[in-house]
Structures are given as structure tokens and as C-alpha cells.
Image (cartoon, grey):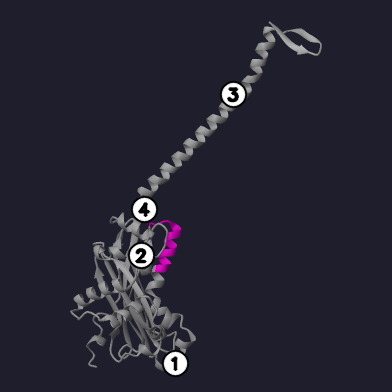
Amino acid sequence: MEDKREQPGGYDRVEISPESDSREIRDGLPKQKNRQKGMLFLAVLLFILIGMGVFGTFLYLYPSKGCQNYIVQKEQYYVEYSEQYDYWDVITVEYPRLEGAADTVQESLNKLMYDTAMDRVNYWHLEPSDAVKNFQKEYFSVFCSDVNCDVTFHSQYLLSMDYQEYYSAGHPIWMTNGTERALTVDLLTGESYELQDILEINKRFIKLWDEAYCDEQDEDYGNDEELETLLSWFLQENEEINANFFCSPFFYVTEDKNFVVGVSLDPVLEYAYTYKPVKRSYCAKLTLEEIEPFRKESVFWERYDNSKAAGEVLPCEDKIENIWLGKDAGVWNFEY
């Protein structure tokens, strides 16, 4: 081949051999291959990212199987006249214990379920504040607590419990209070759901709740002032009530996936003196359709909507009746 290239003085003839031409072509091949490898890498990376997105969407739309083969074993904390205190104590507290969940979740939930059962016992008896200690010196002769726990709903995602208690802050005849509290927990995360986490509590909701409660109790519906008071209880915004009572809203899920919603008022100090047994716990059963307009954005609803029965609940073995506050105790037949 001949190539004419302009030189300062004219044209010179330059010969290019076939060997040199093929060498230049070969020298360009590695660069082309590198570009091809780069394009291939980007294509693979894009494919992986798309796959991860599809997989994430699948996980969102189709939740995990959750916790299937677990057991809830009911147990009882029992004390009868321990002689450790200046007053007598008789305590029968039933609580649930979880087996078969992930270790960290199981440990935290078992502590939470136990502490919830022992709530009033801790306040009045095991962990009293200075104010409660002074109250004890004046009033306490016998401290009693009788807690019964019902596991009302258990699925692969959720566990819901109702705790009902009668306790005597000093004397089982003159100072007996009834209360109720509940717990609904996530078996995958260990999270506990409060009423205001899942429902918008406003005057419309309170009106719905009040009508359901009054229908169950065969009472007249509340007027506007009474509804405002109820709303302040559920929102824990009533200063006068909060000074004398622990105002505690609660809910639990029933076996048929309806809801029991309530609020309990537990005395802080002096209102524990009742003269005769008093229960300041108020609850009503509501259907899913009734509460649908009040649903909040919450993981709870994803768990609830996909829940199916799972796990097994075992009764408390050798459960002991409270001699002062049990179902056959004489306090219920006392003539006040």
C-alpha cells in the first residue's frame, strides 16, 4: 500500500505493510473488549437491582409465614402470707409465658407479659413509691391481688391478652378495687400496640363507643358533656382525674377478630378506700366494620388483616384460688 502524506517541501511516499495494518487492528481489540465487559457488568447490575425490587415487592405483598408452632403456657405467681412485710400478703397472679418464638422477641415479650400482669402488685406492694409507703403505714393490714389472664387471640403475627384483676390496697373488705388491662403484641418484632397507635380517638369514636357500652349495660346514652369527659379519659387529658387515678385506655382482639375497647381508672392513693368492692373499668365490644373509619396507618393492620389462627394456649397447671379475692371468697358475700 502507498500513503501520501503532506510534508514541508512536497509529498513523500510511505509504505505500510499488511503486517503493520493488522497489528494496529489487533492493538484496538483489548479496548473494545473492556468496553464490552463494562457493558455486561452494568447489565448484570441492573438485572440484580430489578430483581431486588421485585423481591422486595413480593415480600411486601406476601408477608412472611410468621410464628406458627409456638406455645403460650399460662403460669401463676403465688404468695400466701410471706411474713416479709409489716402486713399480710396474699397474691395469685396469672400470666402467659411464650415458647417457640425468636429468642430476643420471646425474652422481651415474656418480660412485658409478666410485668403487665404484675402492674398493680408492683405499684402497691413490690415496688412502692414513698407516697405509697406512707399510705401503707396508715391503711395496710392485708394486701391482696387476684389476676386472671385470658389469651383472647393468637395468630402467626399477633398475640392479644385480657387481664382482669381485683386487688385490695390494704384491706380486702373495705379497700377492694376491680380493674382491667390488655396487651396486644407483635410476634415478629416484639412491639406492643397501644389503642392510640391503631385508632383515631375523637368525639365521633367516643359516641360510637358510648352507644355500644350503654347498649351492653342497658343504660342511657351519654350527653355531650359526658362524652367530653369520656374523651378526656381515653386521651388521658383530664387533669382532675389524673391527679387521683391512673387513667389507662386499652384494647384487645377477640377470637372472632372483633375488638374490645375500654378504659380503667386505678386509684393513686386515697381513692383506694372503697368501703365495698368497686370496679372502675369500662369496656365495650366493637366490630371491625364499626371501627373501620377510625383506622390509623400502622403495621398492626397489616398483621391483623393477614392473621390466621396459630399457636397453642395451655392452661395454668395447679392454679390456686385467692383465699381473700377468689371466685368463692367470702368477701363477695359480706354484708356491707
- Give whichever of discs 2 and 4 has the lower sequence position: 4
Residue 104: in magenta span: yes
Is the residue 43 above or below the residue 71 in the image?
above
The amino acid pointed to by label 2 is: Ile
Q: Mark 3 to mark 2: distance in Å?
A: 58 Å
Asked if the residue at tag 1 contacts the one at tag 2, i.e. Cβ–Cβ closer than 8 Å, the answer is: no
- Could one spot residue 7 in this view of the protein? yes
Q: Secondary structure at mark 1?
A: helix
According to the picture, the residue beneath numbered tag 4 turns out to be 66
Residue 20 in percent (x, y) is at 69, 11
Q: Quadrant of the C terminus?
A: bottom left
- Residue 330 in percent (x, y) is at 25, 86
Q: Main secondary structure of the magenta part?
A: helix
Q: Is residue 280 covered in magenta?
A: no
Of badges 2 and 1, nearer the viewer stands: 2
Q: CA distance from mark 2 to mark 4?
A: 20 Å
At label 1, counting other C-alpha atoms closer than 10 Å, the crowd grade (few under 14, some 14-19, many 20 or more) is few
In the image, what residue occupies the spot 22% across and 75% down? 211
Q: CA distance from mark 1 to mark 3?
A: 90 Å
Q: Specify whether 77 is left or right of 210.
A: right
Q: Nearer the viewer, mark 1 or mark 4?
A: 4
Q: Nearer the viewer, residue 279 or 128?
A: 279
Q: Secondary structure at mark 2?
A: helix
Please determine whether, in this image, residue 34 is positioned above or below residue 46: above
Label 2 and label 1: CA atoms lie apart by 42 Å
List the residue tagged with mark 2. Answer: 198
Identify residue type, mark 1.
Lys
* Residue 318 image-quadrant placement: bottom left
Badge 3: how crowded within 10 Å, few (<14), some, or many (20+)?
few
* Residue under numbered circle 3: 33
Q: Secondary structure at mark 4?
A: loop
In x, y percent, where is residue 60? 38, 49
